[in-house]
Amino acid sequence: MNKPVLCALELSDQASDEKVLSQAARLAELDGAQLDVVNVLPDFGESWVSGFFEEHHHQKAVKDTTQRLRDLCTKVLGKDGNAKVRHLVATGKAYQEILKVAETAGSGLIVIGAHKPDLKDYLLGPNAARVIRHSDCSVFVVR
């Protein structure tokens, strides 16, 4: 058994997420590796924005996001395939949390989606580019 494959999903574009998940599942299966699926929620707890949310908001967001990950995995991988997947929800800056999850899980590969860059991506750097730059393991980008 090889190191886990970590699939990072945005859950914002279902067609793109399905494509990324399918590719990650294929790569994990080729290696006989564990498939982990992660989504990162923004951290509103450390800013003035947190005042607009009730205390249980984050717990509800984690629960809802976990269910969305399970539903997507079941749709793309089937019920049996989904049963083998570890569904993870992290909170913070997307690229930092993806890297933390990959390190904690001992991932050998991160599979992440990327869109065509626009001007703001060149100035700020998209999450996929940051994951690629800072990752200690291989990164497979799906377009």
Image (cartoon, grey):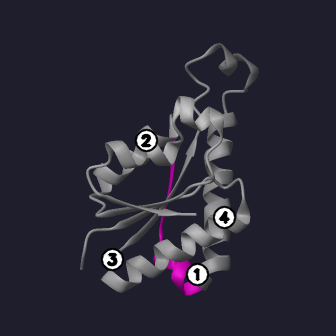
Whole-Å distance between the Cαs marked 3 and 1? 15 Å
* Residue at x 66% of width, y 64% of height: 16
**Is residue 82 left or right of 132 when viewed as pictured?**
right
Q: Nearer the viewer, residue 13 or 86?
A: 13
Q: Amino acid at mark 2?
A: Arg
Q: Which mark is residue 33?
A: 3
Give the number of the mark in front: 4 or 3.
4
Q: Which residue is the site of mark 1?
A: 77
Residue drawn at x 61%, y 84% as measured from the top left: 78
Horizontal and vertical percent for residue 50? Answer: 66, 21
Q: In whole angstroms, how far apart are the C-alphas of marks 4 and 1?
A: 15 Å
Q: Quadrant of residue 33?
A: bottom left
Q: Amino acid at mark 1?
A: Leu
Task: Answer yes or no: is residue 2 visible.
Answer: yes
Q: Where is residue 137 drawn, in percent x and y?
A: 28, 56
Q: In the rendered structure, which segment of residues is drawn in magenta?
A: 79-91
Residue 130's mark?
2
Q: Earlier in the sequence, mark 3 or mark 1?
A: 3
Real-space Cα separation, disc 2 to disc 1, in angstroms: 28 Å
